[in-house]
Amino acid sequence: MTDLTLRTRIYGLLDRTSQRYGARRLRVLEILMILIGISSVGAGTVEGLAPTALAAAASVTGFVAIVFFIEYLARIWVAPENPLFHALTDARSRLRWVMTAGGVIDLVAVIPALAVASGGARLGAESASVFVLLWVLKLARHTPGVGLITRVFHNERSPLVAAAALFVMVLFSAATIAHWLEGERQPEHFGSIPSSLWWAVVTLTTTGYGDVVPLTPMGRVIGGLVMLCGICVMALVAGILATGFAAEVRRREFVRIWDLVACVPFFAEVGAVAISDIVVRLRTRSYPADTTVIRKGAAGDSMFFIVTGEVEVRIGERKTALRDGDFFGEMALLDRKPRSADVVTLTPCTVLVLDVADFYQLAGQQPTLIAAIETEAKRRRSNNHSTNT
Ligand code: CMP
């Protein structure tokens, strides 16, 4: 029983998706260990380092490798706690975890530890340098952007393959033409198509080491054309990736805002088509407690829907609390007048923001939605009016 509790607690700490304090601290510690490990391996390859410094670097490398080995064993032990494997026996869930992408990366990262264990406490600096590559893989797992990059490459694979095909076509054409034009004058560099490929790659990527250069006038003309083609291909690849990134970020933002819109009951009666129309116009914003979101008398440029948190509407002595699901800031947009009250957050708040231009466009496309906002604004106005009189 005690064992099971301990296992559950350790799983909670090692869970990479957990946002709990302990789990987050452990992730930071792991990143630090990886960086220390990479630095110590790097230090071990520096020539002329004092033997004591070399020994210290090797010990740190060994220590980091052993810590990762212990972490790997711990992850295998706690695998049955993973909700994904609850239907499986302990042994099967462990086996399943070992075969996941995360399990394979962790196994690859502990290979150095196995090398340390089998080769004694210290390894040669050069053989240890391979650890860097393995630990960089582990570091990649802690970078949320890596998932985004992988997704973009996957989404854009067909235009990227087309660009790569174009690159290869230009590369071989350039190498062949350079071989015809320069082969006789520089047989050592252009004597065959394969040997001309080096010049073609260096020129096409516009790297230009300058170790091989065309000498004939026509060879130089071809060199110039290949450089221009290289710039075009690189621009094409950059364009494909940039649009791919923008589309993927927009898609992710859409899903995130869609989830938040579902938390606002005001949108509950609106159909899915209308919601998708609204979602693309909303932005999320977070405020800490005690922040003035709207100042009385200021120009109204947006309205807000509260996803979580509580705000207070202040008109003189009168105070009205608004919370999850309520909206505010609509009056200035409807009346085209300055803000009628101060609105201050009482707790940390997450809100969805609708800008004025989108508000008016939405008024044309979703009249029932705007009518519901108008009805509430009318009620608020008459409340404020009766308080004033
Ligand atoms: P706006 O005038 O743009 O900026 C201040 C906001 O406070 C206002 O829109 C309303 O959204 C909100 N507000 C004003 N009076 C009331 C009220 N009586 N009850 C709730 N909210 C109000």
Image (cartoon, rainbow, N blue to C red):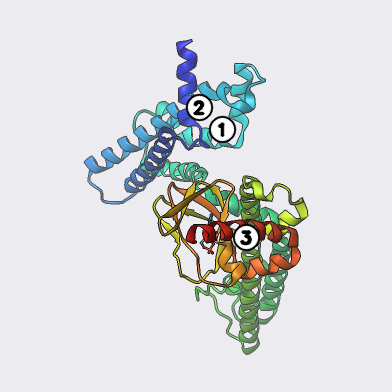
- The disc labelled 1 sits on which kind of residue? Gly
**Closer to the camera: disc 1 or disc 3?**
3
Where does the image place residue 342, in percent across and percent down from the top left? Answer: 45, 60
1 or 3: tag closer to the N-terminus: 1
- Seen from the viewer's position, the closer of residues 94 and 315 is 315
Q: Earlier in the sequence, mark 3 or mark 2?
A: 2
Secondary structure under tag 1 reads: helix
Nearest the camera: 233 or 215? 233
As drawn, the residue found furthest toward the front would be 389
Can the viewer see residue 81?
Answer: yes
Residue 385 % position (x, y)? 53, 61
Residue type at tag 3: Lys
Instruction: Point out which mark residue 378 bears.
Output: 3
Which residue, as the protein is rendered here, is positioned at the far bottom?
217
The residue drawn where x is 61% and y is 85% is 220
Which label was assigned to residue 13?
Answer: none
Quickly name the residue at label 2: 75
Q: Residue furthest top?
A: 1
**Around disc 2, counting alpha carbons within 10 Å, would you say few (fewer than 14), some (14 to 19), or many (20 or more)?**
many
Q: Mark 1 sits on what residue?
A: 103
- Distance from disc 3 to disc 2, alpha carbons, whole Å, reads 59 Å
The Cα atoms of the two marked residues, 1 and 3, are separated by 59 Å
